[in-house]
Amino acid sequence: MSKLDLPYTPDLTGRTAVVTGAGGVLCSIFARALAQCGANVALLDKNEDAAQKVAASIEAYGGRALAVGCDVLDKSSLQAAHKKVKSIFGPCTWLINGAGGNNPRATTTKETYEPGDETRTDIATFFNLDPKGVEFVFNLNFLGTLLPTQEFATDLLGQEGASIVNVSSMNAFTPLTKIPAYSGAKAAVSNFTQWLAVHFAGAGIRVNALAPGFFVTNQNRALLFDETGAPTARTGKILRSTPMDRFGKPEELLGGLLYLIDEKASSFVTGVVLPIDGGFSAYSGV
């Protein structure tokens, strides 16, 4: 895997970044970018094999990376991961809370209510959404941001240049049809980002979030493309509502990430949720 073409390269040499969800499409790109800027990168993911593949790609071009199997919803798992990271890289300076996602059990089949939905059992309607599925999505996104922050923010306290970057979504601004739990959970992440920014301002920790628009990931691929790989009707609606008329590329999130991480560039920026969405949030539909 070749190096990324970064928009710019802040000097992160000798310090450590922890990235949760680092085996995924977007967060693996984050980890690679941070490593190219000189950071030691700890890649946390429940799927340790996926994280290890990303770590190997970083090490192949001379970066320093450590893959750690970790469940962001399990405090003991987080504690063990923290201990391992600290023993090899020392305390971290940056925490990227990227773990998250949706689940089919919290997704409705149709976009809007139709008469009879309240009694149907053959499809997923609002009325028969699995509470456990909804709970899983809320926990993964919100608690999956809160618990790692509880664990790793102790390293950041009083440390010059320390910051946290959460991953929210355009769903947090305007909820999308079919995915009520994910939309609500990402709204909670955005709100929590602002709360953390206020809470930790006196400790020198800046807290911000990225709000990606539409990027193709393993989580949403089935909603965007059918079994043959053809775009779904939902994809057509998305692109018609995105003025740039395309999906984003994961690399297009890196300018925002590096800006928020870089103390020289964003030293007075905290509590911001930065949309990177091809104009989706600016377009009213007419």
Image (cartoon, rainbow, N blue to C red):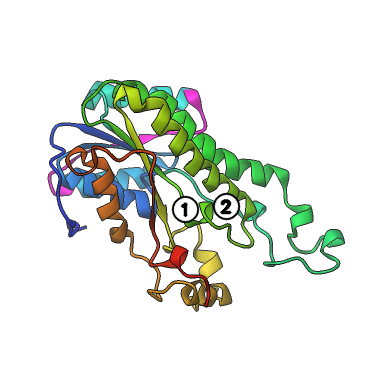
Would you say 173 lies left or right of 13 here? right
Helix, strand or loop under label 1: loop
Looking at the rendered structure, which numbered label has been put on residue 132? none
At label 1, which amino acid type do we have? Ser
Residue at the image position 40 percent from the left and 69 percent from the top: 247
Q: Are marks 2 and 1 in contact (CB under 8 Å)?
A: yes
Q: Position of residue 273 (x, y in %)?
A: 40, 47
Q: Which residue is mark 2?
A: 183
At label 2, which amino acid type do we have? Ser
Q: Position of residue 249 (x, y in %)?
A: 33, 64
158 or 185: nearer the viewer: 158
Q: Quadrant of residue 11?
A: top left
Image position of 92 with respect to 145: above or below: above
Q: Earlier in the sequence, mark 2 or mark 1?
A: 1
Q: Position of residue 103 (x, y in %)?
A: 59, 52
State which quarter of the image contains the N terminus: bottom left
Label 2 CA crowd tier, 10 Å (few <14, some 14–19, many 20+): many
Q: Please say whether residue 71 is visible from this viewpoint.
A: no
Magenta region, residue range: 60-75
Residue at the image position 30 percent from the left and 40 percent from the top: 269
Q: Which residue is mark 1?
A: 169
Image position of 73 with respect to 75: above or below: below
Would you say 138 lies left or right of 58 here? right
